[in-house]
Image (tube, rainbow, N blue to C red):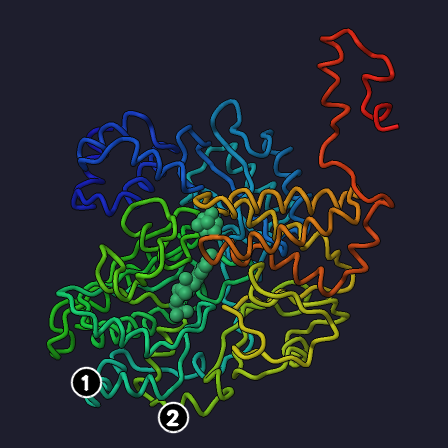
Amino acid sequence: MKTFLETVLAQADYQPVRLLTILREVQAQYRHIPAEAITLLAEALHIPRTQIISVVEFYSFLHLTPQGSYDILISDSITDRMLDKENLLSYLSSVLKVKVGEVRGDGLVSLNNTSCTGMCDQGPAGLVNGLALTRLDRPKIDEIAALIDQQKPLGEWPAHLFEVSDNIHKAGLLLNLPTDKGAAIKAAYNRGIAATLDEIDRSGLRGRGGAGFKTAMKWRFCADEKSDVHYVVCNADEGEPGTFKDRVLLNSYADQVFEGMTLAAAIIGAKQGFLYLRGEYQHLYSKLQAILQQRRSEGLLGNNILELGLDFDIEICLGAGAYICGEESALIESLEGKPGIPRNRPPYPVTSGYLNKPTVVNNVETFLAAGKIAVHGGAWFSGFGTEKSAGSKILSICGDCAEPGIYEYPFGISIRQILHDCGAEDVLGVQIGGPSGTFISNREFDRQLAFEDLATGGSFIVFNNSRNIFEITQNFIHFFAHESCGFCTPCRVGTSLLKKQLDKIVDGHGSAGDVVELESLCQLVKNNSHCGLGQTAANPILSTLQRYPDLYERQLKDISYEPGFDLDGALEVARRMAHRDDAAAHLSQVED
Ligand SMILES: Cc1cc2nc3c(=O)[nH]c(=O)nc-3n(C[C@H](O)[C@H](O)[C@H](O)COP(=O)(O)O)c2cc1C
Ligand code: SF4
């Protein structure tokens, strides 16, 4: 073990900030993080053991106890469920002879659920030792079970099991316009760096990760920050269920994304950039490393880029299964090798980000768009879209439609048009922006996709009339309860109470008082949580309650209140101990 760790540590330059990368290597080698490794790493990195343990416990892909040699995780997104995921999971469990959430007795295989793996256009999906499995069905599961029985190394598994398609159905402004390598950097230097920032300002580009902050303003704040060091970070965490467009951008447009990052570096004065890639996209890692290497060899990264005096390079950091790491300050914590707990803001990353230095964090699509704007100009970009939402939006469309995949539209497009294009019929509603976004009903399809109406980081999930609103809402609420990082009480306790309260109502044990209680709990979680996860976690309930109050009402019992648990049943032990089983010792009798 010592020799292995020394190699891994040397690759990481013995830097504690690379702890997550180091732990991922250890996990891959030993299928867990052994206690001995924790001790050796603590000594080598000069950090406490407890710090390492807290990181292992935070990330769902790291474990203190051994997982199977083949560790299978099945995506539990609502779209996977709509594709019969639950039955497939039971089947997988029976053919592999392992229970969900357990490791088989011989240690060969483990099986569990995981949050959305970003393959909603080709589910049901999963991961085996971190590698994406797509379009799972019974024949594929039989094949996987046989390969595991034969203990075939993953490298020898048939390629079709790991096939990931781009599924681009509608390319627009960004996806249709090829740009030569280096064109954005050359254009920026020809025009002048300050003038290029003005051009991005004129374009009206707003962040594509969801919040829609003006990109030029963010870059200007960061550039103006007095510091010897600045950083550029590309947020490719893409954990919002139903979103997968960054996966496609990195698979087929990575060069242009890296070019956008290089442009940002020139503008803010950064020498180092990071691509924070969600662990679920491990299948892209080698390809992206090769593209970076190619760019270095072509003088597009490294020292003196294109002989323009610009020094900049990009490192890839793989996440380890934590949705919260998409929140920019949690992402920075994770980049620093820590648990991804969101920081207090302000200070914002532009002032104090990675290693407390000014840092620009942008979504993958934002960098892609910025590079194109450097080449084609701000007026070209702002000529598309609406007044407050310039340009286009790349959508990940999935759920009940004939052609799930990637669609790019100018902002301002109606939901009705999008549904028509993707072949959605008999639609009940659409979840826009993932679980943290909004559910709109079929009475709202003339609304527009735009920051001024319906904003989305890219997730667009279609539900037809055969779907159950409660099943959808429950899946989303369970997701938040599972992904809450636990740092602040309103979210940690609140999301778990939301889950219990909603389950109680859906299971038919709710009363009118429970709905009132549910609503006030929603407001409490929304208004008191520390970060965006908690602040949006109640959205699935709030948006369905507002649109379908009668549905909730029909689910209620005809009493004003029923306790959340069986108190009389819980008193059974006390009754036995006290040798009392008379009528007065029963709660119902007391109430009478
Ligand atoms: C819980 C949570 C998850 C997020 N996940 C992502 C994500 O996966 N990708 C992303 O770009 N932004 C995500 N964001 C938004 C980021 O915090 C940040 O606003 C964004 O990366 C900024 O880039 P932009 O200005 O280009 O949109 C998330 C925010 C929250 C609160
Ligand atoms: S709101 Fe939730 S995710 Fe955000 S810091 Fe609090 S517990 Fe963590």
- For the point 82% across and 20% down, the residue is 586
Counting from the top left corner in percent of width and height, residue 270 is at 19, 68
Residue beneath disc 1: 189
Is residue 430 rendered to the left or right of residue 106? Answer: right
Counting from the top left corner in percent of width and height, residue 329 is at 35, 57
Mark 2: give few (<14), some (14-19) or many (20+) Cα within 10 Å. Answer: some
The reply to whether residue 252 is visible in this rendering is no
Give ligand 1's quarter of the image.
bottom left
Counting from the top left corner in percent of width and height, residue 72 is at 51, 40
- For the point 34% across and 89% down, the residue is 376
Residue beneath disc 2: 379
For the residues labelled 1 and 2, the Cα–Cα distance comes to 19 Å
The reply to whether residue 130 is visible in this rendering is yes
Counting from the top left corner in percent of width and height, residue 285 is at 35, 55
Query: From the image, which quarter does the C terminus lie in?
Result: top right
Is residue 56 rendered to the left or right of residue 132? Answer: left
Is residue 416 rendered to the left or right of residue 479? Answer: right
Q: Amino acid at mark 2?
A: Ala
Mark 1: give few (<14), some (14-19) or many (20+) Cα within 10 Å. Answer: some
Q: Nearer the viewer, mark 1 or mark 2?
A: 2
- For the point 60% across and 50% down, the residue is 136
The number of discs equals: 2
Identify whether 505 is placed above or below 577: below
